[in-house]
Image (cartoon, helix red, strand yellow):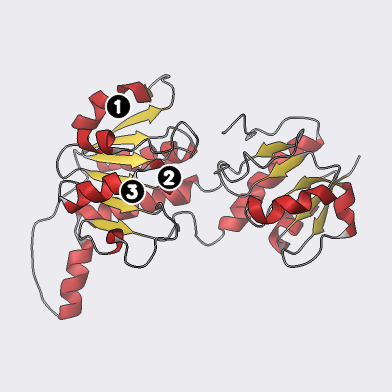
Amino acid sequence: MTITVLVPHDEGFEALSEVEGVRPVRYGLDEALPPEAAEAEVLIPGAKAPRLAPLLRWMPRLRLIQLLSAGAEDWTGALPSGVLLSTCRGAHGGSTAEWVMAVLLSVCRDLDGFAAAQRRGHWIPGTTDTLQGKRAVVLGAGDVGGQLRRRLEPFDTRVRMVGLTARDDVHGVDELPTLLPESDIVVVLVPLTSRTHGMVDDAFLAAMPDHALLVNASRGGVVDTDALVAHLSAGRLRAALDVTDPEPLPDGHPLWTLPNVVVTPHIAGAVRDARRRSYAVAAAEIARYVQGELPENLVHGEY
């Protein structure tokens, strides 16, 4: 049996051409769906759900949507009945963990301050902070969290993993009131769901000690932006944000100009070869589907 898969990128067409039992068909986002859409059982989205959802009516045999992202919140409320949803968990964890390490090291070693002095032609020696001995809470114990832990511990950072549910070597979120006051760094890596939306609120931030650093590499909606701005404006906390709410961050927003925050435009996973890694995971998931198995990254409920 051969199944038809609609693919939005040439890299995906090449990767899926090597999967036995798969007929990849290229489609363009600015073009009408190809005639093969009527036979397609799998769709790899090349755009967000609001743009593609109206086209699903032309795919009566659709049974699986295979994402190229680890986040699934865009599609969980837009799936037709009987259609499975699988994420690309495992493709972007290393890159995102690298971004977290980059901002942690930059903030601790004050690289921005030294770069500003360099631009002015000023030689200003000084003492900086270090990751050695820091206490880090990693909120989100999935692929990205595990990748980050492997990178933090060689820097002699003490890491506590926190998941939505407790398990071996992972604390539950109900323990956060005890863990947060003992943290120098809190890294947020949870998916955006109804349970995590606004999780990092005023009470959460107030529990963090003075001068602690909040890092958000998940989704902007996990953090209450107004509460965060209040704590940052008071000079009590620091932050490094790859995601914001709203996103993109509008002109004139206080997060642009506060001196104790680093903002990047949702690029933690945007590295060279990211698409190739995404399609390697997608091809493996689709191969399982072809063999009559469920994808490993299948979404259940919201995640």
Q: Tell me the residue that label 2 is attached to.
A: 221
Q: Residues within 10 Å of mark 1 (few under 14, many from 20)?
A: some
Q: Is residue 17 above or below residue 78?
A: below
Q: Residues within 10 Å of mark 2 (few under 14, many from 20)?
A: many
Residue 18 visible here: no
- Residue 81: quarter of image: top right
Q: Tell me the residue that label 1 is attached to.
A: 176
**Percent x, y for residue 108?**
20, 52
The residue at 33%/38% (across/down) is 200
- Residue 294: quarter of image: top right
Left or right, 57 with reference to 168: right
Identify the mark nearer the N-term, 1 or 2. Answer: 1
Cα distance between the residues tagged 1 and 2: 19 Å
User: Which amino acid is tagged 2?
Assistant: Gly
Q: Is residue 141 above or below residue 242?
A: above
**Percent x, y for residue 84?**
72, 35
User: Which amino acid is tagged 1?
Assistant: Leu
Cα distance between the residues tagged 3 and 2: 8 Å
User: Which amino acid is tagged 3?
Assistant: Thr
Left or right, 210 with reference to 280: left
Which dot marks residue 225? 3
**Percent x, y for residue 271?**
50, 60
